[in-house]
Image: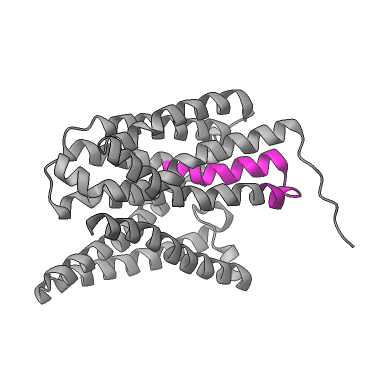
Amino acid sequence: MTTIQQPFHSHQKWVIATVIFGALLPLIDTTAINLAVPAMQQGLHSDVTSIKWVVIGYSLFAVMTVALCAWLTRKVGATQLWLAGLLLFTASSALCANAASLDIILVARALQGVGAGILMVGMQTLLVKAVGREQLKQAMTLVAMPAVIAPMLGPVLAGYLLSVGDWSWLFWINVPIGGVALVLSFFVLPREHADEETRLDVLGVLLVSVGIGSVLYLAVCLDDVSSKGDAQQWSIPVLATVCSLFAWGWAKRHFASLGDNALIRLAPLGIPSCRASLVLLFLASLAFYAGLLAIPLVCHES
């Protein structure tokens, strides 16, 4: 028996278009900024080790924010959180464009990462609330194409903007797009009632932050060791590995004890299809984004 797919009504179409338009900001930014790293290093008079935290800090705060989004959505509402994410991403983009030192741009990129984390999670939440679970597959099909194309357009856009301007243009371009997305979201997305009684799992936040930070720092340390070839520097990667394993092991026990009230619910991981999907998503993302990040840099240097 086949299920007849119902067409979206007018308001649902507007919600889908608004969400896609807002989500384009972090999707394009993810790959565009990497091409501008050499120009930023020269413009900010920084070294290679320091400038790469412009990318790492953004990713770190984005992932940490994703872990908090479930609680934040219940606390303030999905639409209100989406508007805050858009405003934060747009304002921090302007701050990045005006940054005159490495310290300022690192702080601005961290704020931008928080906004990006909110937008990437908020996109799915708003779609579920707008179209329902019955039409979610249809909506995700419409979102999937821009979500794949946008990261590929990032290096192209970055290359053009760097040829006609400087690295700050990659951040200025986010400001008008973010402004239009804010206006659309304000008038199109419905407001929600917040659950002010929901409590934050503070220990869970700390454990996830230490775990994620240790993993990223481990990757940075391994890159430094491989490039410098100093065997004595292996003590730091080993320490980061121990901290990461300890934090994630403690977090697993902590989340399991809290059940549905945990910051991250572990019950879906007990489903074999869910575990397989996560592994495949990880491998596909690794291959997809590695090429998008590496190829433009290689072509730029050659």
When asked about the image quadrant of residue 219, the answer is: bottom left
Q: Is residue 29 left or right of residue 168?
A: right
Question: Does the magenta run of residues contain 130?
Answer: yes
**Helix, strand or loop: magenta stretch:** helix
Residue 263 placement (x, y as % from top left): 49, 52
Along the line of sight, the residue nearer the viewer: 167 or 175: 167
Instruction: Return the residue found at the far right.
Output: 1
| Magenta-span inclusion, residue 105 | no
* Residue toward you, 96 or 130: 96
Question: Where does the magenta region start and end?
Answer: 116-139
| 294 with respect to 40 (left or right) | right
Instruction: From the viewer's side, name the closer residue of 211 and 138.
Output: 138
* Image: 118 above or below 140: above
Q: Name the residue rendered at 76%, 49% in the picture.
A: 134
Q: Quadrant of the N terminus?
A: bottom right
- Examine the rendering and report whether any part of residue 72 can be seen: no
Where residue 14 sits in the image (x, y, percent)? 66, 32
Residue at point 29%, 61% (across, down): 214
How many numbered marks are there? 0
Q: Residue at x 23, y 59 (%)?
A: 302
- Closer-to-camera residue (301/216): 301
Spot occupied by residue 65 in the image (x, y as percentages of width and height): 42, 46
Residue 284 location, x and y as percent? 49, 66
